[in-house]
Image: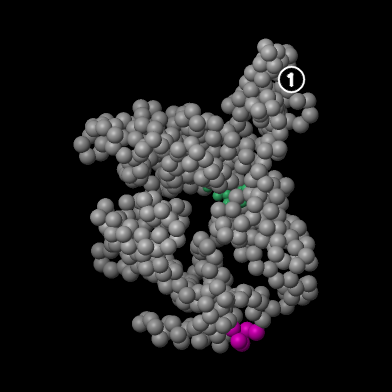
């Protein structure tokens, strides 16, 4: 049917035109671009564009052979209490829309770059998509996080460690897979003295010429079956403009800030899921809690602006998300409650109780907290050679309860900011002890260098991974001997992996040692990555 075919082709073309040309526009230009596109295709009688709603909201559905709303294909969210919080992804229009575009482009080995301000969901969209389709599409996703210190040699090492040798001068994706390298925070690397960013130049060399040079023997290595995807926020605040010579290889999409509607949708879904088992009086609170949290978040991000003295006052979706990660609610209807005395919550009042049986509760009796903390401290001093003496004044107690709350959360990482002598380290040590975590610190000695730091990290990883101990890694600003330390810490925080930390033999030993536990956890033995 020629007539139908013309319509389908025209509509598909308009869809492609909209995203290919306008995908990089910020939200405030969407309306005008919508109008512009309609004008462009005005005299094309086959296009038959929908007259209501805008073009950004539709995609080409090849089953029903017409333009249909994205909203119709948003999968419903199934709450599963077993899923770790940070992996809970509530499908929204943006997740579906940008996931779809990325999937189609990667399928034809075309690179994709997501941009948009911090916390709009660039990383979660990509990771969510790659996790979803990796098996079906035979992808092997490799996640790399760039930072100011990332070097090109290091980047090459990480990429090559995931590839396998095919022939003398050809390396490529293992097996029949395709490697998708997702470079997050692409524009972080600092400029060298010529104004270029070496790690990006390395990636550009791959995009342009399809390979790298071998750094030792200086021959050209061709790389097969590797596609690069990337994400970065706009330049500013440590992020640099990226050269157009690199960007031109990418399809670029600018993700909009989540609308109030999306925010509500996301957190309402998670909270309602969590509260499903609760009595209906509690369930009904969900809407109010979500709305209040979102309102406070908006107020904070407009009223509490960063100043030189408070440079850490930057708020985004992540902070809001953390409010819901805790999900411990206590309802006190009396407004007096919030102003009369400090609000302290914790699960540590009963000493020696198993982690699973701890009760998270409102701690009202400050004297009682003080005496419990003293008991913990005595216990700490009995088992540790370095004695700590702490006075539990009001602020210290509040800090300890907060640090303990962060530590007991999954991926609970804390950056403690304050002048020297406020007890950032000792309170953390005690809080770790309270939570049943072992606190690990490096000790600077003469000649402590990058190699010593790696040695310490290996110790830390073995304690956490092989011995299966709960660990806190406490690191202070005075311990930054070389900036590369921060690079590794950045990697720990982002992907959990410090590239090339273990030599081959040692890695085998570590694998052998973790295998029994992995087996217990149901990880197939052959799957080295999972182990
Ligand atoms: N659809 C969603 N469902 C659940 N959480 C989300 C969703 N979108 C964003 N988030 C939350 O927002 C946070 C920020 O997203 P992220 O991808 O890290 O932002 P970006 O990479 O753009 O800076 C994430 O940690 C996640 O908790
Ligand atoms: Mg990100």
Q: x%, y% of residue 437?
A: 45, 72
Residue 384 shown in magenta: no
Helix, strand or loop for disc 1: loop
Say which quarter of the image contains residue 122. top right
- Expressed as whole percent of the image width and height from the top left, the position of residue 418 reads 51, 68
In the picture, the quarter occupied by the N terminus is: top right
Task: Give the total of numbered labels.
Answer: 1
Crowd class of label 1 (few under 14; some 14 to 19; many from 20; radius 10 Å): some
Front position in the image: 248 or 362: 362
State the residue position of label 1. 48
* Colour pattern of the rendering: one colour
Q: In which quarter of the image is the C terminus?
A: bottom left
Foreground: 265 or 214? Answer: 265
Residue at horizontal 64 percent and vertical 64 percent from the top: 327
Q: In this view, does 324 lie above or below 222?
A: below
Q: Is the magenta stretch mostly helix, strand or loop?
A: helix
Q: Seen in the image, is 5 located left or right of residue 410?
A: right
Residue 109 can be seen in this image: yes
Quadrant in the rendering for residue 370: bottom right
Above or below: residue 348 compared with residue 496:
below
Q: Residue 471: horizontal and vertical position, in percent?
A: 43, 68
Q: Most extreme residue toward the left, as rendered?
A: 217
Q: Position of residue 258 (x, y in %)?
A: 66, 45
Please give the name of the residue rendered at 74% of the width and 71% of the height, measured from the top-left corner.
331
Q: Is residue 181 above or below residue 264?
A: above
Q: Residue at x 74, y 60 (%)?
A: 286
- Which residue is more in the foreground, 293 or 243? 293
188 on left or right of 512: right
Image-based side of 325 in relation to 217, left or right: right
Residue at 76 percent across and 58 percent down: it is: 287
Please give the range of residues in magenta: 365-369
Viewer can see residue 194: no
């Amino acid at each position: 049917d020629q007539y139908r075919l013309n319509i389908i082709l025209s509509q598909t073309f308009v869809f492609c035109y909209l995203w290919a040309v306008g995908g990089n526009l910020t939200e405030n230009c969407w309306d005008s671009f919508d109008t512009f596109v309609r004008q462009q295709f005005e005299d094309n009688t086959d296009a038959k564009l929908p007259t209501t709603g805008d073009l950004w909201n539709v995609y080409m559905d090849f089953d029903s052979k017409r333009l249909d709303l994205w909203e119709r294909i948003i999968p419903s969210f199934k709450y599963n209490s077993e899923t770790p919080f940070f992996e809970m992804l509530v499908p929204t229009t943006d997740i579906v829309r940008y996931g779809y575009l990325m999937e189609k482009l990667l399928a034809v080995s075309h690179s994709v770059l997501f941009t948009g301000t911090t916390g709009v969901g660039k990383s979660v969209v990509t990771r969510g998509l790659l996790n979803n389709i990796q098996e079906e599409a035979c992808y092997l996703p490799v996640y790399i996080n760039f930072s100011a210190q990332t070097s090109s040699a290091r980047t090459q090492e990480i990429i090559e460690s995931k590839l396998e040798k095919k022939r003398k001068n050809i390396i490529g994706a293992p097996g029949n897979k395709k490697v998708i390298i997702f470079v997050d925070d692409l524009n972080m690397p600092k400029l060298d003295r010529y104004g270029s960013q070496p790690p990006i130049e390395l990636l550009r060399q791959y995009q342009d010429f399809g390979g790298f040079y071998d750094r030792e023997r200086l021959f050209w290595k061709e790389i097969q079956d590797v596609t690069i995807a990337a994400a970065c926020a706009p330049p500013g605040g440590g992020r640099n403009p990226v050269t157009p010579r690199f960007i031109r290889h990418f399809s670029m999409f600018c993700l909009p800030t989540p609308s109030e509607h999306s925010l509500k949708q996301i957190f309402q879904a998670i909270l309602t899921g969590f509260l499903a088992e609760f009595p209906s009086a509690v369930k009904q609170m969900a809407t109010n809690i979500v709305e209040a949290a979102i309102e406070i978040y908006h107020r904070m991000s407009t009223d509490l602006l960063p100043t030189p003295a408070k440079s850490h006052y930057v708020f985004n979706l992540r902070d809001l998300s953390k409010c819901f990660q805790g999900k411990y609610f206590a309802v006190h209807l009396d407004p007096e409650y919030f102003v009369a005395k400090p609000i302290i919550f914790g699960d540590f009042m009963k000493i020696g109780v198993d982690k699973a049986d701890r009760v998270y509760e409102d701690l009202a009796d400050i004297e009682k907290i003080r005496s419990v903390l003293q008991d913990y401290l005595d216990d700490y001093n009995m088992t540790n050679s370095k004695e700590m003496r702490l006075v539990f004044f009001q602020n210290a107690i509040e800090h300890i309860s907060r640090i303990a709350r962060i530590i007991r959360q999954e991926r609970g990482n804390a950056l403690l900011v304050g002048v020297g002598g406020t007890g950032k380290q000792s309170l953390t040590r005690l809080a770790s002890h309270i939570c049943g975590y072992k606190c690990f610190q490096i000790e600077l000695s003469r000649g402590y260098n990058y190699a010593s730091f790696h040695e310490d990290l290996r110790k830390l990883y073995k304690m956490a991974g092989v011995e299966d101990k709960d660990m806190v890694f406490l690191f202070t600003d005075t311990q930054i001997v070389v900036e590369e330390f921060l690079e590794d810490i950045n990697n720990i925080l982002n992907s959990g992996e410090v590239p090339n930390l273990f030599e081959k033999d040692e890695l085998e030993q570590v694998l052998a040692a973790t295998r029994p536990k992995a087996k217990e956890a149901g990880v197939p033995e052959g799957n080295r990555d999972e182990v």
